[in-house]
Amino acid sequence: TQSAHESLKPQRVHFQSRNFHNILHWQPGRACTSNNCVYFVQYKILKKRNMGGGGKNPTTLRSLSFPFYRYGQRQWKNKEDCWGILEFFCDLTNETSEIQEPYYGRVRTTSAGIHSGWTMTQRFTPWWETKIDPPVLNITQVNGSLWVILHAPSLPYRDQKGKNVSIENYYELVYRVFIITNSLEKEQKVYEGAGRVVKIGALAPHAGYCVVAEMYQPMLDRRSQRSEEQCVELP
């Protein structure tokens, strides 16, 4: 019946994206209990025709200027690893690797020979929507100063030589570094820029300091969460 189809339909179908790891998530329909429902996932990319304007290779997006496109439909494709599964998620990272392109995902349910309709995501464009993790810090003491080395998060992509692709290929990044003087419980921004090696000098001896950092994406006006604090005692 129509009501049976509707009560099986997956709910809240959406992408969650972190560092371009793009996972489709959903909730079971009202009629699904324990393991009585299996799920089928499809995805598609929107085909686009360049109608003029600037554009750049996805590996050089830092000075991006978006062209004007007219979109057309492509066919839905089955995600074979997520065809008849019990889980409420499906990894579509490899299928959504053209990060400037818009994608859709959709999910349907089968239970006891009854098929639900499809529930579709909103349009998902990884470049705009992925959330970037904070940088990782390494700190070294040298002659009363602190040298901070910043590492951007790793991505699921590799170049032709098999090396990890840096997130700096995809975005202009600004690093912000803050130091906290433990005795004063006072925080101060000591660096903001594109460099990944930062020297913090003019520090008092025999004092404890903690360093924390974040990344800012100017084109999106978006900042990451802050890194974990790294703390040191100066001799």
Image (cartoon, rainbow, N blue to C red):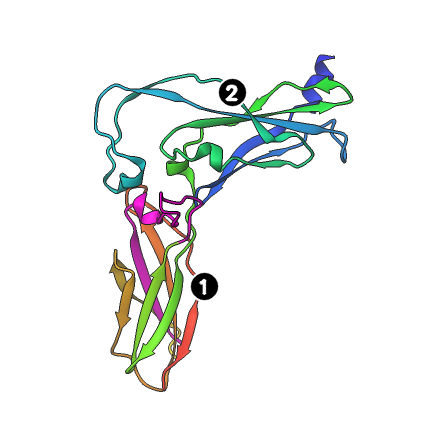
- Label 2 packing within 10 angstroms: few (<14), some (14-19), many (20+): some
Task: Count every numbered label the image shows and give the total.
Answer: 2
Taking depth in this image into account, of 50 and 68 the one nearest to the observer is 50
The residue that label 1 is drawn on is: 228
At x 40%, y 74%, the residue is 185
Residue 208 is inside the magenta segment: no
Mark found first going from the N terminus, 1 or 2: 2
Q: What stretch is highlighted in magenta?
A: 153-182
Q: Is residue 115 left or right of residue 182?
A: right
Q: Which amino acid does label 2 sit on?
A: Trp
At x 30%, y 40%, the residue is 59
Q: Which amino acid does label 1 sit on?
A: Glu
Callout 2 secondary element: loop
Callout 1 secondary element: loop
Asked whether the residues under the numbered discs 1 and 2 touch, taking CB atoms below 8 Å apart as contact, a structural biologist would say no
Residue 23 in picture, x, y percent from top left: 53, 38
Q: In which quarter of the image is the N terminus?
A: top right
Quarter of the view holding residue 137: bottom left
Residue 131 in picture, x, y percent from top left: 43, 45
Taking depth in this image into account, of 176 and 38 the one nearest to the observer is 38
Quarter of the view holding residue 38: top right
Residue 202 in picture, x, y percent from top left: 25, 78
At x 66%, y 37%, the residue is 87
Q: Is residue 114 above or below residue 233?
A: above
The residue that label 2 is drawn on is: 76
Q: Is residue 41 above or below residue 148?
A: above
Quarter of the view holding residue 83: top right
